[in-house]
Amino acid sequence: MAKIPTVFISSTSEDLKPYREAAKEAAISARFHPEMMEYFVASGKHPPYRACMENVAAADVLVAIVAYRYGWIPPDQPGAGSKSITWLECEEAVQQGQEVLAFVVDPGAPWPEADREEHRITANIRTATPELLAQVQRDIENLSKFKTWLNSLGIRTTFANPQDLRTKVESALREWRPKPRPKRPPRPRPAQSDPTVYLKSLREQTAWIDIRGLQVGAGKAYRFPIEELYIPLTMQSRDRQGAAVELEEALSHHRLVIVGDPGAGKTTFLRHIAHVWSSGLLDAPAHASLLFPIFIRISDLAEHIRNCKDKPGRPTTQAAPSWLLHFLTAQSEELNWGLDEAFFREKLKSDSCIVLLDGLDEAPNQQERDAIVRLFEAAIQAYAACRFVVSTRPLAFTGLAGFHTAQIEPLEPSAIEKFLEHWCRGLFPQDAVGAGRHLDELREALQRAEIRRMARNPVMLTALAVVHWNERHLPEQRADLYESILVWLARARETRPGRVSAERCLELLQALALAMQTHPKGRQVQVEKGWAAAVVPLAFVEQEEVDSGIIVSRGSEVRFWHLTFQEYLAARAIAGLPDTAQYELLLTGGRLYRPEWREVVLLLAGVLIRQGRGKVDGLFSAVLDRLGVSSALADQARCAGLLGAMVRDLTPLGYQPADPRYREVLDAVLGIFDAKKAAAIDFGIRLEAAEALGQAGDPRLGREENWITIEGGTFRMGAQKSKHPKQPNYDPEAYDSEAPVHEASVKTFQIAKYPVTVAEYQRFVESEGYLDERWWIAGGFGKTYEPGRWQEQIAHPSWPVTDVSSYEASAYCAWAKVRLATEAEWERAARGSCGRKYPWGDAKPDVTRANFAEGQVGHATPVGLYPAGDTPEGIQDLAGNVYEWVADAYAPYGEPAEENTGESEPVRVLRGGCWYYDSRNLRGSYRNWDEAGLRSSSFGFRCVRDMRP
């Protein structure tokens, strides 16, 4: 009789009892013998570390269940580390050559707050000590690192509830059973195919975060270990509790595009992942299920293709996926990895490889970006089993067929605080008092609203920390921030004999930056040193990397340490030209509107304003002159969007354009909100133009005609899929909560054309509405003093206000002498008297009608930007963009709402779908609900008012 295999089930205990039981039942059903700690530790005391490991080693396979608790940390673990017992058990299984089947809770699944690590603080709020707070913070950080490590194993499934877990564990064990992994190590590869040299090189290359300018006197960058300074990034999506979801969760997609603004942390994230996975393979080379990371800078790949496309033996077309093999083989030869083309082909064809492709936006021009996009789309067909992750800036990204998109969210206040703590510990590793004192100084410096907004970008936050360290004060405008950083870096070289002054250093570097931006083949991010020597002295180039680190060498080539340095220095160079030369350079050949020039133009405004506001006015007038008086709406919208972004960048300085034509252009682009006119204009251009209108004071908002009358009467409310399709309000997509279909009556009322915007809500905040208890009849007074993420929101005046609870929505309505709609009124407005499926009718949703997940915008948008989705009466944004609180407490149709006893938050209804959910939630009958006190970046509201006599 065949031996029954043993599965070791590893997890935290108290919070996962039903899940452990489900996993045990799954193991028995799959004909495995389940082994868990409580089977051999009856006393309840923790056994020695080695005893735990011995039981893991005796098993054939390990199942790890991970939720929101980190768990027990054995004090006798090797190296006096701080890994949890679950993490250690998983590592032991890997060392033994066992497969680890990891099951991680779905971030969208409901989860008791008491079973989260943070609850330890809440439960001990009266007696919480600094030691407890620090321990909880460390455990949360370590749990995130553990989940990232689990990702490196390549086998990870999410679960939502015990039954879901049982099904998935049983399926995984049955799939594993016919082909258990041998515990002996695989046969060694021939020497030329041993990836150890490559993995060590990648681990070392990604092990550090270099901070330029921190130790200027030493003439080098200050190096922080990446695992000490790195903070988890989040996506612009939310779980069911409204919490941000960590970017690591997106790695469950085999084809992923990570989209983020300049400095959002895209490269650091990929380097962090590459470091974790290369370290994992080096620590456990025999483990067959570990993912093999291949890290490629797309600018390097594009340069390789450009240099080799006319050479014999190269791939036949510029978009051929075999360029990946061609490039990697060349890299191996140059860097002595000892890996041949056959090795890389084998990896790319396997399911144990992940290719990390960094910086799609760094390809030099649109033509090469398009070719790279086609290459990647072909690669996922040629290497279907392999995983691919691509990073890019938003404006350089027009879509990758077959890829899921994850957009990086600005840093949360908690993430900023975590970075500052790591930063200060790194600066004062042996001085806790000094670290605490510096942390307090940084917190104080970051209190100003404009500084706080800049700090939500990781690179800007790092730059702020450096400038504060050097100067003990912070600038308010980002061009000034970059100037401070670069001046400090350039001053490092002055301490060396025979070096030029800091100002001359920057003049030479800005000449190089501008030459790279205006390269005949398109913007370059990396050039041959020989080419650079034609612009600046070769000796300067060779000295500069050692002296200041603003530029770095890559073999025979040179690049700026961060692309933003190149963009700022190019802007600085342009600002030094005569006005006519500036305008000719920017306006010739459409440079002004190219994605690779956008940051240069925005930073140029910040440099010019130092020379006087008239310099910025002159630039605006030159752009408006080129636009002309009879330009197409698309050209006007493009111009308004760019100039509006420049105005927004200068907000800390209170700049407003003097040229009256700017206001005229903004008025003219109101056509972007017309369904017929908008159809011919790219969405990105319309979005930028709408943002510019919001900054200048959107003339659509605040008008009396924005109140739309809905006639009263009786109508059929709800939807059903259980009866015959010919029965009223049949909808095969209906949820049970939408049934039964029933008659509802409303009186004639007026509903707002748009959800309440940030600009409108700001008046309530500034009138001290949060401090006046008379508006808070519905409850919630004194719990909050402004909406969540408020400093970020006020940068987008025409977006719907979000991160407000039902209480805040009701208080605003009371202040404005209006009210929230009833659920029946909202559905009558959305579906009409005839019961249409969507606000616009019965046609299927598409990205012209609503802001929902398929459009991949990743956030709320200015109101009214989807005119094709209007109701016949002209109400906008009733489907998508943001959910809208209504007045009703939730209850199944036909049942009374539960009476609120005060022991828990009442549950209120939300309507309308939102930007991160799919089309099913856009239907007019769809009902959502949540606790009245909950906030989310997808929760807003709309007002109604009774008909005036």
Image (cartoon, rainbow, N blue to C red):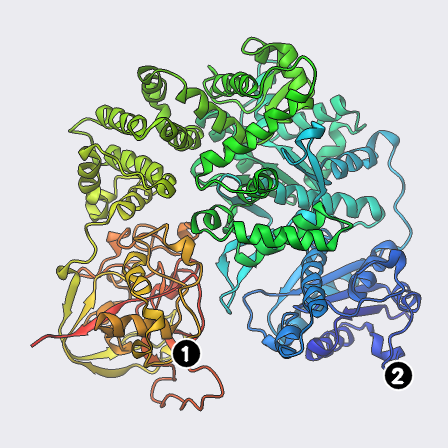
Residue 271 found in image quarter? top right
Residue 796, numbered label: none
Q: Position of residue 643 (x, y in %)?
A: 31, 35
Residue 670 found in image quarter? top left
Q: Position of residue 228 (x, y in %)?
A: 71, 49
Q: Nearer the viewer, residue 832 or 236?
A: 236
- Residue in the picture at 67% in, 78% down: 127
Circle 1 sits in a helix, a strand or a loop, which is it?
Answer: helix
- Residue in the picture at 79% in, 63% down: 177
Residue 736, numbered label: 1
- Do callouts 2 and 1 mark residues in contact (Cβ within 8 Å)? no
Q: Earlier in the sequence, mark 2 or mark 1?
A: 2
- The relative height of residue 540 versus residue 191 in the rendered view (above or below) is above
Q: Position of residue 408 (x, y in %)?
A: 51, 49
Circle 2 sits in a helix, a strand or a loop, which is it?
Answer: loop
Q: Position of residue 544 (x, y in %)?
A: 64, 20
Distance between the alpha carbons at the discs numbered 2 and 1: 48 Å
Residue 43, numbered label: 2
The amino acid type of the residue labelled 2 equals Ser
Which quadrant would the N terminus be assigned to in this image? bottom right
- The relative height of residue 322 versus residue 183 in the rendered view (above or below) is above
- Residue in the picture at 73% in, 40% down: 207
Closer to viewer: mark 2 or mark 1: 2
Indicate left or right for 222 with 517 as reference. Answer: right
Q: Nearer the viewer, residue 610 or 53?
A: 610
Residue 674 appears in the rendering: yes
Q: Residues within 10 Å of mark 2 (few under 14, many from 20)?
A: few
Indicate left or right for 687 with 248 as reference. Answer: left
Which quadrant would the C terminus be assigned to in this image? bottom left
The amino acid type of the residue labelled 1 equals Asp
Residue 584 found in image quarter? top left
